[in-house]
Amino acid sequence: MKNLFIAALLAIFMVTGSVSCMFRILEPSPAPTVFEEEKLPYKVAILPFANKTSNPEAGTIVRKMFYNFFSSLNYRDLEPFVIDENLKANHLYADVTGGKKVSPRKLGQLLGVDAVIYGEVISLGKIYAVVYSDNQAGLKARMVRCSNAKPVWELEHTIHIEEGDVPLSPIGLAATVFMTALSHKQATHMKAASELCMQMIATMPNPPGVSEPSPKIQALVHNGAGKLLQPGDSIKVAMIGDKNQVASWSIPPLIENLPMKEKKPGVYIGAYRIKARDRLAHGRMVGILRSKRGVGSQWMDTLGPVRIGRPTVLPPVIANDYVLTIEKSPYLVTGALVVKPGV
């Protein structure tokens, strides 16, 4: 089963690696505006991206992917969840995600950074035909220095990926429709967001490094997103990056720095069997790749939160003083009756 998981992963990224041949020929190269290339800011926060698409997850997906590629540069960055918690505590999260103007100076003082990156996702994934998925990802992004609100770098860029083969039989047609819909929902969104952010980050000015370059990570995937993992289940993780490195993965605070094995050059595999007392309502997976000298990089999971534990069954009748706690989460609802006001 693990070999099947690895094979599926490699198949996905063989396709990803050949994505460039599927781009429209007339698609322009990224043309950034770079205002500063010397004395660049040191500490940078990537703010929550405003989402201007019909896909409710677009802002989160593209921001995480942008963060993953940005972390390979020589800036010092804050993890997105640290930024989000700070913004929510200061009642600024809704303003930032809504695209409202928030003072860079105020954000710099609040987050303790020299610059902030604003982003606006303008597209992620569109289907124009039944058997052809025409996937698009677009982002407006700019880095602004907090001390004087002057831009350091800005770029609006869109990539376009065409996929789909002409079916030669009714069975082929059915299979193509199914595969196209499946890839559009998740895999192609990930590919488009990844290619978009990789191209954009490549245009960004990069301060000189103080040590050897950190290992590059291309992707992190796992089988735990979108479901509840209960005792006895296994979570399997695969990461693709530079070969001959030291790899590990974590879901803090439950799982910390579990080692991964390099099954094929640059393909690292890990697994963990859920124990009876394991419980986590909303876990964030992180992959870490380090050189033999200890220089490392990390990749934040973009597939979604991991939920672990045997669910607490709610009673059929819930009293007014019944309290739901994070310690007993996740909860299992076997039936629900919603009574609207006035009914």
Image (tube, grey):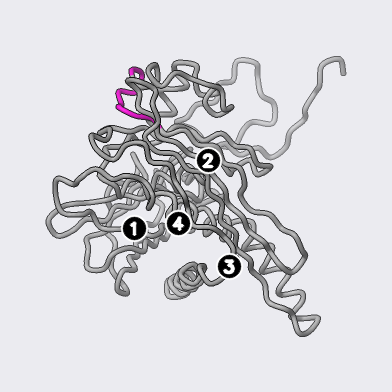
The magenta span reads 109-116
The mark closer to the camera, 1 or 4, is: 1
Q: Position of residue 206 (x, y in %)?
A: 28, 45
Q: Position of residue 150 (x, y in %)?
A: 38, 26
**Disc 2 marks which amino acid?**
Lys
**What is the C-alpha distance between the residues marked 4 and 3?**
49 Å
At x 32%, y 44%, the residue is: 205
* Disc with the residue nearer the chain's start (1 vs 4): 1
The numbered disc on residue 140 is 2
* Crowding at mark 2 (Cα within 10 Å: few <14, some 14-19, many 20+): some
The mark closer to the camera, 4 or 3, is: 3
Q: Are marks 2 and 4 in contact (CB under 8 Å)?
A: no
The numbered disc on residue 249 is none
* Disc with the residue nearer the chain's start (4 vs 3): 3
Q: Position of residue 64 (x, y in %)?
A: 45, 44
| Residue sticking out furthest to the right | 343
Residue that carries the numbered disc 1 in the rendered image: 217
Residue that carries the numbered disc 3 in the rendered image: 25
**What is the C-alpha distance between the residues marked 2 and 1?**
24 Å
Judging depth in this view, the residue of 96 and 209 nearest the camera is 209
Give yes or no for residue 114 being in the magenta stretch: yes
**Disc 4 marks which amino acid?**
Gly
